[in-house]
Amino acid sequence: ASLTPVGPLGELTDLAVKRVQVADLVAAAKFGTPQPIDDPAREQQVLDTVRTKAAQLSLDPENAARFFRAQIEANKLVQRGLYARWTEHPEEVPSRRPDLGTEVRPILDRLTTDILNELKDTEQLRKPTLRCEIHATFAERSAVVLHHLDPLHENALAEAMRPVCSK
Ligand SMILES: O=C(O)C(=O)C[C@]1(C(=O)O)C=C[C@@H](O)C=C1
């Protein structure tokens, strides 16, 4: 059985869901350590990689970077939400702390590649049109149901998908 959201933006939406879900691992890696949620140097590195790989795919690098800035904002939204939750309910803090550098960021790096390939595959559709907005809405709504997203991750997904039709 496929758990991919419906329509031509289903795969891209699915990858955005995966990225906001990895935010749980990022938060688990950082919570209770001095490592801050915001890491501007890492963000710069992610965006530099995005621009380089976008150019290799003949995608507009600035458009791709805009999409990834939204992915990063969405990721931080989840991290902050989980910090608030875990501060209030310490019993919900994950028992294992994943390693950010060797375990969590490599997952994000693979998602960067996958998302860029989907941006390429959906390039024709992703224009500021009602058609694109409708497909984005359907994919988002189905993702929320398929993945049982809680309000925190649902809001983060909405943030992540905001620039999807703004080619
Ligand atoms: O890699 C991290 O440390 C993260 O928190 C993930 C992430 C991202 O979404 O790529 C988000 C916030 C940080 O400022 C840097 C990067």
Image: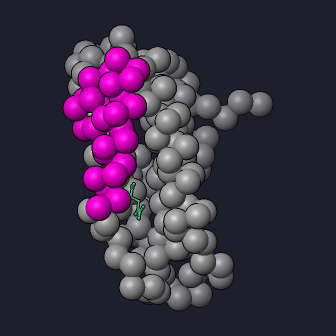
Looking at the image, is 5 positioned above or below residue 145? Answer: above
Q: How is the image coloured?
A: one colour
Query: Is residue 53 among what the camera can see?
Result: yes
Which percent across, then down, holds residue 143?
53, 38
Q: Residue at x 34, y 33 (%)?
A: 52
| Left or right: 9, with 74 as reference point | right
Magenta segment: 41-67
84 is within the stretch colored magenta: no
Query: Is residue 161 among what the camera can see?
Result: no
Q: Residue at x 31, y 45 (%)?
A: 47
Looking at the image, is 107 positioned above or below residue 136? Answer: below
Which percent across, then down, holds residue 163?
27, 34
Which percent across, then down, holds residue 57?
40, 21
| Quadrant showing the N terminus | top right
56 is within the stretch colored magenta: yes
Rendered image quadrant of residue 4 = top right
| Quadrant showing the C terminus | top left
Q: Residue at x 45, y 85 (%)?
A: 33
Rendered image quadrant of residue 48 = top left
Which percent across, then down, holds residue 6?
55, 24
How many numbered discs sit on the rendered protein? 0
